[in-house]
Image (cartoon, helix red, strand yellow):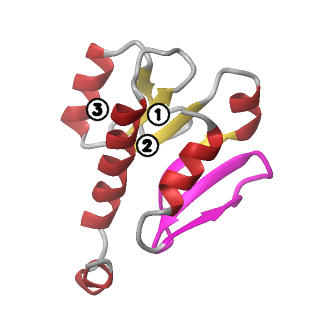
Amino acid sequence: MNIEQYRDYCLNKKEVTEHFPFDQDTLVFKVLNKMFALASLKQWEAGTGFINLKCEPEYALELRERYTSIKPGWHMNKNQWNSVYIHEGELSVDFIKSLIDHSYEMVVKGLPKKQQEKLN
């Protein structure tokens, strides 16, 4: 997966917007103003790119045990966020997309019911 594929995949989800709230390096995707994915553009360009994605805590641990490319979320709550290293080649594009979907769904589940209804 390259950065354009990642960006397009995230932006094609309902009510998703992109932001640079921290600096000009960290690209953040939000659903209804709640963050579900972020990545450092500089890291990506350097060939060490990763995406921070929200994850159900037990599933997060399972993924970390199974894949060396998935580590506790860098600069995030380690219980609920994973860093998914893209350039290590261990993970297929389809699997990475499924992890992005899971993160999006986790955030949507935490939204108020009215906002969830807006997405249906």
In the picture, measured across the screen, residue 74 lies left or right of residue 94, that is: right
Q: Secondary structure at mark 2?
A: strand
Position above or below: 64 against 78: above
Asked if the residue under mark 1 is in contact with the one under mark 2, i.e. CB atoms within 8 Å, the reply is: yes
Q: Secondary structure at mark 1?
A: loop
Q: Label 2 to label 1, Cα distance in Å?
A: 8 Å
Amino acid type shown at disc 3: Ala
Q: Position of residue 55 (x, y in %)?
A: 31, 42
The quarter of the picture where residue 99 lies is top left
Q: Position of residue 53 (x, y in %)?
A: 43, 43
Segment tinted magenta in the rendering: 16-38
Residue 35 in view of the camera = yes
Residue wearing tag 3: 60
Dot 3 or dot 2: first in sequence order is 2
The answer to which of 74 and 104 lies nearer the viewer is 104
Magenta-drawn stretch contains 80: no
In the image, what residue occupies the spot 28% across and 32% down? Answer: 60
The answer to which of 55 and 95 lies nearer the viewer is 95
Q: Position of residue 41 (x, y in %)?
A: 72, 39
The quarter of the picture where residue 28 lies is bottom right
Dot 3 or dot 1: first in sequence order is 3
Residue wearing tag 2: 53
Q: Position of residue 56 (x, y in %)?
A: 24, 43
Residue wearing tag 1: 73
Q: Secondary structure at mark 3?
A: helix
Q: How many marks?
A: 3
Amino acid type shown at disc 2: Leu
Quadrant of image for the N terminus: top right
